[in-house]
């Protein structure tokens, strides 16, 4: 007990001796994998039609990314772009979150078992692998206690924000490379083998670009804050770190650039590229840190929705017990330079995530935040600042691991009857972490795909043009992307759900295609259920739009206000619909052949 009360600096964090993989490590990883399977159990038992309820339309979009990537691999096409969506302009896949680093190696799975299987593997494997990655780094380079490392790793993979993004964003679930990128940066600072470590860093950075650039940017920002805090505490040590860091960063940066320069050129300057994606002010409300996420044991959906953009953007939600606990741990571990630097980065990134001004339970205090210094910089101008709170997750995991290691050094046995310190500590951890522990994600069955697409009937109506779904696919209704997947990407779609430019001469980003007049008209009918008065001007506009889309057929599947949509298209074309294999259709090739 006396040692526990000493300044933590007297019990420093020491890199433990090199450890071999053993049964404990295997058990830890299997526990992570089991937990991930439980979270996605509803999806795994229904890979045919399972759909994550809180993903909105994102599952349709992501499955399309995986499907179109596999299609490109199979047909030896350029995987950086595709015209299967938003025909004829196409989609810049590098400028979207297509995760080519996952979609390409998993393309055989996609081709054999369908994109839903790839989607399930990405999400399940992502959470488990992220936990395992941080566990490896913690247990080999931060603490002696494997249990402490396992607890820290579990939080890194299954924190509330990870589960929230796990509904719809595999680019924020598959973060397994980030702990090893951080480790390589630290290795560079230690200066043992800067060239070798620089090569490893360059390879990791290059691959992470194809998994997710935004998580990489957030992680690097968090590491920079950590590094500044450490250097401020140990300036003499920092001087020795400059040379190996410069060498390693130069080697790694050049290697990463060589490997990614063409894809990055395509992303920022290629077809359908854009410069920035504006989201407005989307900082975290301070209440988001102390409340519980929707899909956590103590979660309250209404309270979470009150201070978040949607179910997939619950980026803080650590819960008040954990927030208080982190303050206590920070005070206790303050004398330790590593723990102090981690804690500083945690609080600074939390502050940055509040946005331009601090908002407390919807009350804008007007107090400016440091985000204003970064908000308009390139890359940062497209970042959702509330996501910066996700950089706090590995910091929390590391502090949990360090604190557990401290306790276990002081109390070396679970059999101490006088003061069962280990058991008391584990009880505290359960009390703090159980409320934010995840619950299984809600899974529903999506509507069956019409036989028109699954049976190949579409091929009788599509020659070289596109399919125009009624209403056209958009971020609000992307079902048509799934129909195209079920038809093995046999036809292109007009419009869709993706991120692209706001127009030919407007490089601001937007979600979905630039709406043409006919698309806007059909969306209005779907939303209102009212059949409008149709004019000759609208009929002429429809023909112009169909020619723009190179349309071969218009297809209406069962949808809200279906009868109103059917009547509207019949009035526009002055032609009744034909019912074929579960859809109403209009063959428009005679209108677009000119």
Image (tube, rainbow, N blue to C red):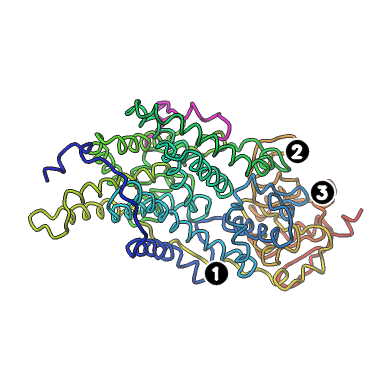
- What residue did someone put label 3 on? 548
Which portion, as a residue range, is magenta? 357-379
Circle 2 residues within 10 Å: few <14, some 14–19, many ≥20? few
Relative image position of residue 341 (x, y in whole percent): 34, 35
Whole-angstrom CA distance, mark 1 to mark 2, is: 39 Å
Judge by depth and name the residue closer to the eye, 157 or 499: 157
Image quadrant where residue 588 sits: bottom right
- What residue did someone put label 1 on? 47
Whole-angstrom CA distance, mark 2 to mark 3, is: 14 Å
Regarding mark 2 in the picture, which secondary structure is present there?
Answer: loop
Which of labels 2 and 3 is toward the front?
2
Earlier-in-chain disc, 1 versus 2: 1
Relative image position of residue 99 (x, y in whole percent): 59, 52
Judge by depth and name the residue closer to the eye, 149 or 365: 149
Judge by depth and name the residue closer to the eye, 90 or 297: 90
Residue shown at 34% from the left, 45% from the top: 396
Regarding mark 3 in the picture, which secondary structure is present there?
Answer: helix
Residue shown at 63% from the left, 41% from the top: 258
């Amino acid at each position: 007990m006396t040692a526990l009360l000493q300044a933590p600096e007297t019990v420093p964090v020491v890199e433990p001796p090199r450890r071999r993989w053993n049964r404990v490590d295997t058990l830890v990883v299997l526990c992570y994998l089991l937990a991930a399977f439980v979270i996605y159990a509803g999806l795994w038992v229904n890979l045919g039609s399972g759909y994550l309820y809180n993903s909105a339309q994102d599952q349709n979009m992501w499955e399309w990314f995986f499907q179109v990537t596999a299609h490109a691999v199979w047909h030896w096409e350029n995987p950086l772009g595709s015209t299967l969506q938003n025909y004829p302009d196409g989609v810049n896949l590098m400028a979207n979150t297509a995760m080519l680093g996952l979609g390409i190696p998993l393309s055989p799975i996609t081709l054999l078992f369908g994109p839903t299987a790839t989607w399930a593997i990405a999400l399940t494997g992502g959470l488990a692998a992220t936990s395992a990655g941080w566990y490896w780094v913690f247990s080999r380079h931060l603490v002696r206690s494997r249990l402490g490392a396992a607890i820290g790793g579990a939080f890194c993979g299954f924190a509330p924000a990870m589960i929230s993004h796990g509904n719809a964003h595999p680019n924020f679930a598959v973060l397994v490379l980030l702990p090893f990128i951080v480790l390589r940066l630290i290795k560079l600072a230690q200066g043992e083998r800067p060239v070798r470590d620089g090569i490893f860093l360059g390879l990791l950075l290059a691959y992470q670009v194809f998994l997710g650039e935004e998580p990489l940017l957030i992680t690097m920002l968090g590491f920079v804050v950590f590094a500044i805090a450490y250097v401020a505490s140990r300036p003499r040590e920092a001087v020795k770190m400059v040379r190996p860091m410069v060498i390693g960063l130069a080697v790694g940066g050049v290697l990463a650039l060589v490997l990614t320069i063409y894809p990055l050129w395509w992303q920022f300057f290629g077809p359908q590229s854009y410069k920035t994606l504006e989201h407005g002010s989307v900082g975290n409300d301070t209440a988001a840190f102390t409340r519980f996420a929707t899909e956590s044991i103590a979660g309250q959906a209404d309270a979470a929705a009150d201070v978040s953009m949607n179910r997939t953007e619950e980026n803080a939600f650590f819960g008040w017990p954990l927030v208080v606990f982190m303050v206590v741990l920070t005070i206790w571990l303050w004398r330790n330079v590593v723990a102090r630097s981690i804690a500083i980065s945690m609080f600074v990134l939390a502050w940055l995530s509040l946005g331009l001004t601090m908002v407390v339970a919807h009350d804008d205090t007007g107090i400016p935040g440091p985000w204003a210094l970064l908000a308009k910089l390139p890359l940062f101008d497209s970042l959702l600042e509330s996501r910066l709170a996700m950089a706090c997750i590995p910091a929390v995991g590391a502090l949990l691991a360090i604190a557990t290691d401290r306790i276990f050094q002081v109390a070396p046995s679970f059999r101490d009857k006088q003061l069962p310190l280990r058991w008391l500590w584990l009880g505290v951890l359960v009390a703090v972490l159980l409320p934010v522990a995840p619950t299984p994600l809600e899974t529903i069955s999506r509507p069956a795909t019409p036989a028109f697409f699954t049976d190949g009937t579409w091929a009788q109506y599509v020659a070289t043009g596109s399919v125009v779904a009624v209403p056209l696919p958009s971020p609000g209704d992307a079902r048509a992307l799934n129909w195209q997947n079920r038809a093995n990407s046999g036809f292109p779609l007009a419009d869709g759900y993706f991120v692209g430019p706001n127009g030919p001469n407007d490089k601001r980003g937007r979600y979905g295609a630039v709406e043409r007049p006919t698309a806007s008209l059909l969306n209005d009918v779907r939303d209102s259920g009212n059949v409008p008065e149709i004019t000759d001007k609208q009929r002429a506009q429809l023909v112009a739009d169909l020619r723009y889309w190179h349309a071969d057929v218009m297809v209406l599947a069962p949808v809200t206000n279906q009868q109103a949509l059917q009547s509207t298209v019949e009035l526009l074309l002055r032609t009744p619909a034909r019912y074929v294999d579960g859809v109403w259709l209009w063959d428009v090739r005679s209108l677009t052949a000119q």
